[in-house]
Image (cartoon, rainbow, N blue to C red):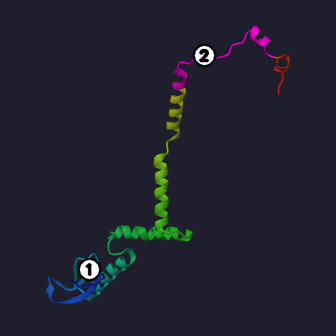
Amino acid sequence: MRTATRKTFEVFKLSSPNGKNWWKIEGRPKGRRERFYFKTEKAAKKGASDRNNQIAAFGSQVALPETERVMAAECIKLISPYGKTLYDAVHFYRSHLDRHASSISIGELCDRITGEFQRRLDKPRDFSAALYFDERDLEEVPQSVRRNSGQAP
């Protein structure tokens, strides 16, 4: 059974050079050994420090390219005055995009309404149930209702 290994990078001096490189850093951030070679001890320490800082900030399973790390750091600075995190901002923006994707434009809404009105106007109408009154029907209406029918309630 394999013993537990460190995920962080450590600096080593080589007993014989790898080309012109005398220094290496080695670590297992993702479980597999990774090695990087450097010409000077200072460069090797800086490389190990940068990679270890990246692991501490983002974890070992997500490898962000340098440009995305810089962008994330800038975004964090922009929203920090509002007391929000990058996580909050991303989830807010995602819900905004979901709402926007499910909505329609005013022009499309007007087209739909116009189509529905046109459909209703073109539909044949049945007027057989409409009530038409003649003088004989009015005789059945009580006198009190006929007197008040012209007045506003």
Q: Nearer the viewer, mark 1 or mark 2?
A: 2
Q: Position of residue 42 (x, y in %)?
A: 29, 87
Asked if residue 135 lies in the magenta stretch, the reply is yes
Label placed on residue 28: 1
Please say whether residue 101 is one of the residues in the magenta stretch: no
Q: Is residue 105 above or below residue 27?
A: above
Image quarter where the N terminus lies is bottom left
Where does the image place residue 23, in percent across and percent down from the top left?
A: 22, 86
Badge number at residue 151: none
Residue 142 as seen in the image, left or right of residue 62: right
Q: Residue at x 72, y 12 (%)?
A: 133
Residue under the image location 54 percent in, 25 percent down: 120
Q: Is residue 32 shown left or right of residue 103?
A: left
* Kind of element beneath mark 2: loop
Where is residue 59, by image quadrant?
A: bottom left
Examine the residues drawn in magenta and state their main secondary structure: loop
- Label 1 with label 2: CB-CB less than 8 Å: no
Disc number placed over residue 127 in the picture, else none: 2
Query: Relative to 45, is 86 above or below?
Result: above
Q: Residue at x 46, y 66 (%)?
A: 87
Badge 1 element: loop
**What range of the chain is rendered magenta?**
119-141
Q: Residue at x 84, y 23 (%)?
A: 151
The CA distance from mark 1 to mark 2 is 83 Å
Identity of the amino acid at label 1? Arg
Give how far across and how far down residue 66 sits, in percent.
Answer: 34, 70
| Amino acid type of the residue that numbered disc 2 sits on in the rendered structure | Phe
Q: Earlier in the sequence, mark 1 or mark 2?
A: 1
User: Depth check: 55 or 20 in front?
Assistant: 55
Left or right: 100, with 5 as reference point: right
Foreground residue among 140 and 146:
140
